[in-house]
Image (spheres, rainbow, N blue to C red):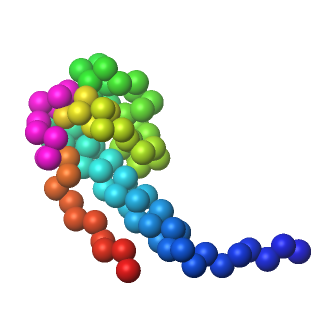
């Protein structure tokens, strides 16, 4: 039986924190999209991104590129900073 090695680098904690940030960004995208009475399909059309990509971003399943975030902010007709109005927890 293989014993998993103990992670002492803190990368596991950082990864969880990154996942939290991606989920928070996705929630924010969904929130703004709904405030503008847009469907995911509407946002995909105006942003030029694939519908599946919009869904995965909103669920925090993928690491959105800056280019994708820019496309979404243009599609939603908002400042990019509007999508980042959340605070991440500090990594200990």
Q: Residue drawn 17% across and 28% down?
A: 74
Q: Is residue 37 visible?
A: no
| Residue that protrudes farthest toward the right in the picture | 1
- Please tell me whether residue 89 belongs to the stretch shown in magenta: no
Q: Nearer the viewer, residue 4 or 77?
A: 4
Q: Residue drawn 71% across and 75% down?
A: 5
Is there any visible trace of residue 5 in the rendered image?
yes
Q: Quadrant of residue 77?
A: top left
Location of residue 24 with respect to 39 vertically, above or below:
below
Above-or-below relation of 81 to 45: below
- Drawn side of residue 45 relative to residue 77, left or right: right
Magenta stretch: dominant SS? helix
Which quarter of the figure is the N terminus placed in? Answer: bottom right
- Residue 8 vertical placement versus 59 (above, below): below
Tell me where residue 54 appears, x and y as whole percent.
37, 34
* Image-quadrant location for residue 51: top left
Q: Residue at x 14, y 47 (%)?
A: 81
Question: In this picture, which residue range is highlighted in magenta?
Answer: 74-82
């Amino acid at each position: 039986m293989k014993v998993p090695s103990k992670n002492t680098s803190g990368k596991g904690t950082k990864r969880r924190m990154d996942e939290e940030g991606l989920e928070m960004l996705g929630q924010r995208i969904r929130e703004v999209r709904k405030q503008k009475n847009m469907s995911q399909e509407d946002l995909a059309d105006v942003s030029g991104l694939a519908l599946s990509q919009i869904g995965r971003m909103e669920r925090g399943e993928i690491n959105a590129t800056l280019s994708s975030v820019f496309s979404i902010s243009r599609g939603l007709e908002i400042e990019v900073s509007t999508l980042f109005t959340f605070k991440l927890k500090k990594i200990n």
